[in-house]
Amino acid sequence: MENVSCCSKKRKMVQAKTWTLTKHFDGFPKKSDFELKLEQLPEPKDGEVMLEAVFLSVDPYMRPFSRVRMNEGEVMIGAQVAKVIESKNAAFAVGSHVMGYCGWRTHTVCDATGLTPVMADWPEDVSLSLALGAIGASGLTALYGLEEVLGLQAGETLLVNAASGAVGSVVGQIAKIKGCRVVGSAGSDAKVAFLKELGFDRTINYKTVGSLDQALREAAPEGYDCYFENVGGPFSSVALPLMNDFGRIAVCGGISLYNDTTPQTGPYQHLTIIYKQLKMEGFLLTRFEHKHPESLKRLMAWMKEGKLQCREHITEGFENMPAAFMGMLQGENTGKAIIKV
Ligand SMILES: NC(=O)C1=CN([C@@H]2O[C@H](COP(=O)(O)OP(=O)(O)OC[C@H]3O[C@@H](n4cnc5c(N)ncnc54)[C@H](OP(=O)(O)O)[C@@H]3O)[C@@H](O)[C@H]2O)C=CC1
Ligand SMILES: C/C=C/C(C)=O
């Protein structure tokens, strides 16, 4: 008798590659802190989709957040732009693209929680990778830091560090759009040349400058009204005394501290903050989530008008994610660090 199976159409099994955190980082991340694993994926259930990563993001926050939001053995946290390859959710058509915090994985089966369709009218000639950078989290962070936290006004002088990176490069360009004077600091001559291309008024290579204090003073003899802080630590201690009275500081990040094994101490600038009556505010871009759709449209419009250049540092190959992450923390990137699968 012929063996007739009730499931004559056999589904091809999908295997995901994942990068897991073997051990919490201790100091600067090491290759051995990561492990590449294979995972057999189940078929999506009702309401679920199967995603295939196209671009993945490596970001500074992964270093500090891994310690507080992850357990050892878990897949590394992070965002990706992915293609929907199977769907049992009417809101996500097969072939469409989404942005999701799926972690460092090539394929994912999940429900729609936390998935955002990439902007419906995303232009065909614009790479979807920008949804992870200048027309995504990095651009939004820059915009909110300037508008919502600093309240930057035309004619003011702004200081930004890590200025050639994903967030910093957008900060400087938006500040120029707003009619401000912009001073940017970055870690190589090539990066400083990039800042000049973007229209920064004054640039500093903080790694080669003799005295950072002197360089910052010369770059803005009139002082700084606003400071977009990405680095923290000693840079911050030098910059705060150069703020003008009633200056505002948006504390976006502190990348110089993320790999510290013991917390840094002073010099403390409390008296400077008091005497100059400074306003210092930390923020996370998630606070302004309700503004994302409108803000993404503004960023896209600036890019299309040629007012916003979106540089990317692309690493090919999912296998190279840990190297790309460590490279970004060491300053290998100019613009947004992206992994192309
Ligand atoms: N608050 C929020 O919601 C968000 C905060 N952030 C923060 O914004 C900052 C920039 O992030 P992002 O633009 O994605 O990253 P970048 O693209 O700027 O990449 C990181 C850069 O930081 C610089 N850097 C690394 N180590 C040091 C150090 N010890 N001192 C000074 N600079 C250093 C390097 O550039 P260089 O060669 O110039 O040193 C490196 O290229 C980070 O602090 C991040 O945590 C980012 C997104 C959201
Ligand atoms: C959401 C991102 C936060 C930091 C500190 O990078």
Image (tube, helix red, strand yellow):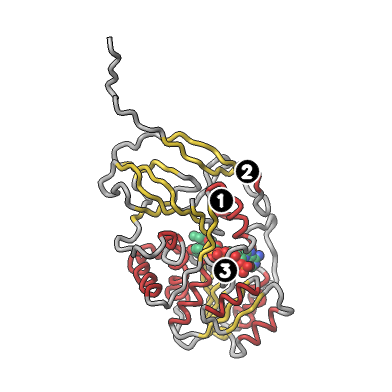
Label 3 or label 1, whichever comes before in sequence order: 3
Say which residue label 2 marks.
23
**Can you name the residue that lies furthest to the right here?**
210
Amino acid type at circle 1 is Met
**Distance Cα–Cα, label 3 vs label 1:** 23 Å
The nearer-to-camera label among 3 and 1 is 1
Q: Is residue 144 above or below residue 318?
A: below
Amino acid type at circle 2 is Lys
Residue sitting at 57 percent across and 68 percent down? 230
Q: Secondary structure at mark 2?
A: loop
Q: In this rendering, does residue 254 appear at all?
A: no
Q: Are marks 3 and 1 in contact (CB under 8 Å)?
A: no
Report x, y in % for residue 6: 27, 21
CB at mark 1 closer than 8 A to ligand 1?
A: no
Q: Secondary structure at mark 3?
A: loop
**Distance Cα–Cα, label 1 vs label 2:** 16 Å
Q: Is residue 282 above or below residue 219?
A: above
**Distance Cα–Cα, label 2 vs label 3:** 27 Å
Q: Secondary structure at mark 1?
A: helix
Say which residue label 3 marks.
230
Report x, y in % for residue 341: 48, 50
Give the label on residue 321, or none.
Answer: 1
Quarter of the rendering containing residue 36: top right
Q: Residues within 10 Å of mark 1 (few under 14, many from 20)?
A: many
Label 2 or label 3, whichever comes before in sequence order: 2
